[in-house]
Image: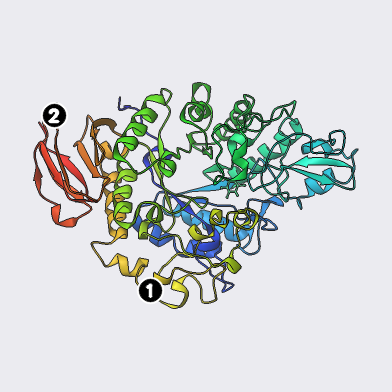
Amino acid sequence: MERKTKHLWWQEGVIYQVYPRSFQDSNNDGIGDLKGIAHRLDYLEWLGITALWLSPVYSSPMADFGYDISDYQDIHPLFGTLEDFDVLLKEVHNRGMKLILDLVPNHTSDQHPWFLESKSSKNNPKRDWYIWHDARPGGSVPNNWLSVFGGSAWEWDETTGQYYYHAFLKEQPDLNWRNPEVQKAMLDVMRFWLAKGVDGFRVDVMWHMIKDEQLRDNPQNPSYEQHMATYEQLLPFYSTDQPEVHEIVRKMRDVLDSYDERMMIGEIYLPLHKLVAYYGIDNKGAHLPFNFQLLALPWDARQIAAAVDQYEGALPAGGWPNWVLGNHDQPRITSRVGLEQARVAAMLLLTLRGTPTVYYGDEIGMRDVPIPFEEVQDPQGLNMPDKNLSRDPSRTPMQWDNGNYAGFSVSKPWLRLAKNYARENVAVQKNDAYSMLSLYKRLIELRQKEPALMTGDYKPVYSDHHVMSYLRESATSDNFLIVLNLSHRPCYFTIKNYEIKGRIEIATALELEGNEITETISLGGDEGIVVRLSKK
Ligand code: NOJ
C-alpha cells in the first residue's frame, strides 16, 4: 500500500551516475574532473536530476580506474583537489540536489600505505588487515578461488613468503573485514565524508566484503559453458555473500544513521532472494540494494513483467525498490535493445515504483563505442581472453555538442568518442521534441510532479510476449496507466477487470499524445504510453 508517511529524498528522487573521467574536462588534459562536473550542474538540474553518484575520485594508481584506492581521504589530482570537491558539494547542495560518493571498502590499491605496511613483514601490525595465507604443501595457492578479472585470486608475495587474496586485480588486495581495526578505519572514512556533508555512498561489491573464515574451496558451477568468463567456472559460495556481511552492513548503516538523512546503496549482483536480505533486519541494512534485474533479463515483456512482480513481492515490508538500466560495468541499454526500445526502456525505468538510477549518456541514447584493440584500457578487457568483456565501450566521453571532442574537452579524450557525436549530443537533442533527451526530461518532470508516479502504488495489469502494462496509483492524485510494447511489431489487447478511461500524457511516438484511450489499446511496434486516467 502507498505509505502515508513522508518519503525521503532518495525515495522521491532520480539518481544520475557520473563516470567522472568521461563527463566533462575542465583543464584540457582529456580526462573529466570535478570542476567539469560542477560546470555541468545546470544541465543536470534542467534534466530534473535530484542526486548525483560519482564513481571514485580518490587518490589511486588507476589500475582499475579509481576502484583501486591509495588514499580514501584525498582526491586524485586528475580530478582536482579536496577544495574542488568542497566547491562541487556546495554547488550541488545550493541547487537542492544531493551528492553520493562511491565507497570501495572491499579492497584497497596495492599502493595504499595500509597494504605497503601489511606486506612489509609478517609481524607488521597491519599484517592481518589483509587476507594472507601460506601456500599449500607443494607451493600451490591456498584454495581454488578465482579472480573476477581472470586467473587465481591469490598472489604470491616473495618477501614474506605468503599469498594474499584479491577478488579483482592483484593490484586490489582485499581487506580483512574480520579485523576490528579495518572496520574502524573504514567507518572513519565514511565519517570523514559524511562530516563534509556528503549525502550517501554507493558501496562497491558489498556482497564480497567478508569471506569464509576457513577459506573453503568454492564448488564447480554445473552451468558453466566455454563462452563464459573464467570466474564463472566456480560458484562463489564461500568467497562472497557470507552471513557475517550483514553485520558489517549494519555497522555502516549505524554510522549513516548518526547523521541526518544519509543513505547507502549496495552494489550487489545476487539472485533476488539473496539480494533482498541486504535491506537488513528491520530495514537497517542498505537503503537501496541495487536491483540489476533489468540489466540481465532478456528483453521480453512477459519475463520483465514477471520479474517486476517478483521483486515487488520479495521486498521486505518498508523496503524501498529501485531500478537500473545501465552502469559503467555493463553494455549500454541502447546497445542491448536498440535505440527504439531504449525509449521504451526509459519509460519503464521512470515509471516503475522505486528510485531510478540513470547512467550518464543514456539520456541521449549513447551507444557502446567500438574501441580498437590497441586502444583498450579496461583491465577487464586487457586481462580476459575474451576482449569483448572490456567495459571501455560504455565509458566513452559524454557527447555535449558538435564542437571538437563533443564539448567534452579541447584535448584528445582519454577514450575515443562515438563517431556520431556531431549528430547525437545534448545540444542537438535539447532542441528536438522527438529526441531521447526530450523524452527523458519529460518523463522525469512528470514523475517528479505526480505523486502516483513518484511514490504511488504499483499494480500489474497485463503482460504477454509483446506488451506489459501496469498502474501507478495514489489516493491523493491522478492515477496513471503505463503500457509498453517491448517488441517491434504492432499489438493490441483489451484490458479486462479494470475500467480504463484516460488521455495519453507522454508517448514515445509524440503523435499519440492527447489521444483518449479505452479498454482496447493498440500500440505500434516500439511504442510506449503513459496515460493519465480520468477520475471516477
Ligand atoms: C565494481 C565496480 O563497479 C567495477 O567497476 C570495479 O572494477 C569492481 N567493483 C572492482 O572494484
Q: What residue type is labelled 1?
A: Ala
Q: What element carries label 2?
A: loop
Q: Badges 2 and 1: C-beta atoms under 8 Å apart?
A: no
Q: Position of residue 239 (x, y in %)?
A: 66, 33
Mark 2 neighbour class, 10 Å CA radius: few under 14, some 14 to 19, many 20 or more: few
Callout 1 secondary element: helix
Q: In this view of the protein, which residue sits in the foreground, 390 or 414? A: 390
Mark sitting on residue 496: 2
Between 383 and 3, which is closer to the camera in this rendering?
Answer: 383
Mark-to-mark CA distance, 2 and 1 = 47 Å
Can you tell which mark lies on residue 55?
A: none
Could you say where residue 400 lies in the image, as x and y percent from the top left?
Answer: 41, 68
- The picture places residue 417, in percent across and down from the top left corner, at 48, 69
Q: Kindly identify the residue that appears in the image at 29 percent across and 33 percent down.
A: 456
Q: Is residue 124 left or right of residue 288?
A: right
Please say if 360 is above or below 291: below
| Residue 410, horizontal then vertical, whole percent | 51, 77
Q: Nearer the viewer, mark 2 or mark 1?
A: 2
How is the rendered protein coloured?
rainbow
**Res 401 visible:** no
Residue 422 badge = 1
Q: In which quarter of the image is residue 437?
A: bottom left
Q: Is residue 484 left or right of residue 147?
A: left
Q: What residue type is labelled 2?
A: Lys
What is the residue that sits farthest to the front in this orientation?
Answer: 226
217 on left or right of 486: right
